[in-house]
Amino acid sequence: MPGRNKSLYSSSQWRRTRLAILERDHYQCQIKSNRCTHTATEVDHIVPISQGGSKLDPANLRASCHNCNNGRIDRQRNNTWRTADCHITLVMGPPAAGKSTYVKQHARAGDLIVDYDAIATSLGADPHEKGQTLHPAINAARNAILRAIRAGTTGASRAWIISAHPQADSKFPYHELVSIDPGLEVVRANAQAAGRPADYRAAIERWYEVRAAVIDLRSSREW
C-alpha cells in the first residue's frame, strides 16, 4: 500500500469499512484474475486513490483476494509513466523504414533512446544476424529500460521507443506516436541496398501482412 495512505489503512474507520465490504461481497473476490484464489481477504479501490478515487465510498470498493489485489497494485506501478514528467514518443514501422534515422534527426542531447539495433551494436553483436547468441542479453537490456519507462523512473525528460513490431502501438507506452512507413517497395529497396539477408527481407513482408490484419480488425470493431 502506498506510504501516503498509511494513516487511512491503519484507521478504525477503514477497518470498519473494510469489514463491511468483505461482508457485502460475501468474502468472494470480485476481480477474478487468472491467479484468483476466490476467497477475499482484502479490499480494493476500483478507481485508485492516486487517480482521484474515493477512499471510503463503498461504490469504489470491492472485496479481493491477495493475488488479485497485488496484481492490480503492480499494474498501477507499471503505469506511472502516465503521470511522470518524461514525454514518450513511440516510433514504429517496418524494418528498413528509417525509424532510427528519424529519431537521430529529432532527438536532443539527454534524450533516452530505446533501439534494439543500437543496444546490440553496443554489446558487440550484429543486430541483423539470424539466431544471434547475444539476443537474450540484448532483449534483457531493452526490456529493463522499457520497465523503467513504464515505472516512470528513467529520470529523462524525453524518451524514444523504436519498434518494428507491427502491433507496437498496442504493446508500448507512448504520449506521441510516429509511424514511419515509406511503403513496401521502398523498404524492400532499402533492405536490398543495405545487403540484408533473406530472413530480414521476409520480416518486412510479414510486417505488412500482420499490420494489414490489425488495421482490418480495428476497422471491423468500429461497426
Image (tube, rainbow, N blue to C red):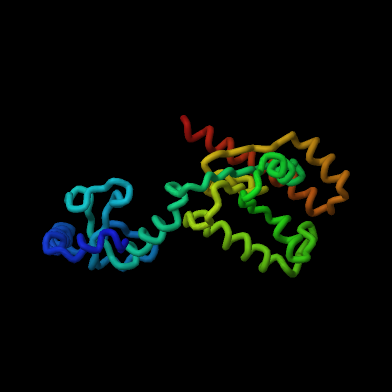
Q: Residue at x 28, y 65 (%)?
A: 65
User: Is 28 above or below relative to 82?
Assistant: below
Of residues 128 and 115, the one drawn nearer to the viewer in this rendering: 115
User: Is 161 above or below relative to 73?
Assistant: above
- Residue occupying the far top of the picture: 223
Query: Looking at the rendering, which quadrant does residue 2 occupy?
Result: bottom left
Of residues 108 and 16, the one drawn nearer to the viewer in this rendering: 108
Q: Is residue 212 left or right of residue 131?
A: left
User: Is 182 above or below relative to 65?
Assistant: above
Q: Is residue 79 left or right of residue 132?
A: left
Q: Is residue 145 left or right of residue 182?
A: left
Q: Residue at x 43, y 53 (%)?
A: 80
Of residues 109 and 7, the one drawn nearer to the viewer in this rendering: 109
The quarter in which the N terminus is drawn is bottom left
Q: Residue at x 32, y 51 (%)?
A: 50
Residue 99 drawn at (x, y percent):
71, 43
Residue 87 drawn at (x, y percent):
53, 44
Q: Residue at x 73, y 46 (%)?
A: 95
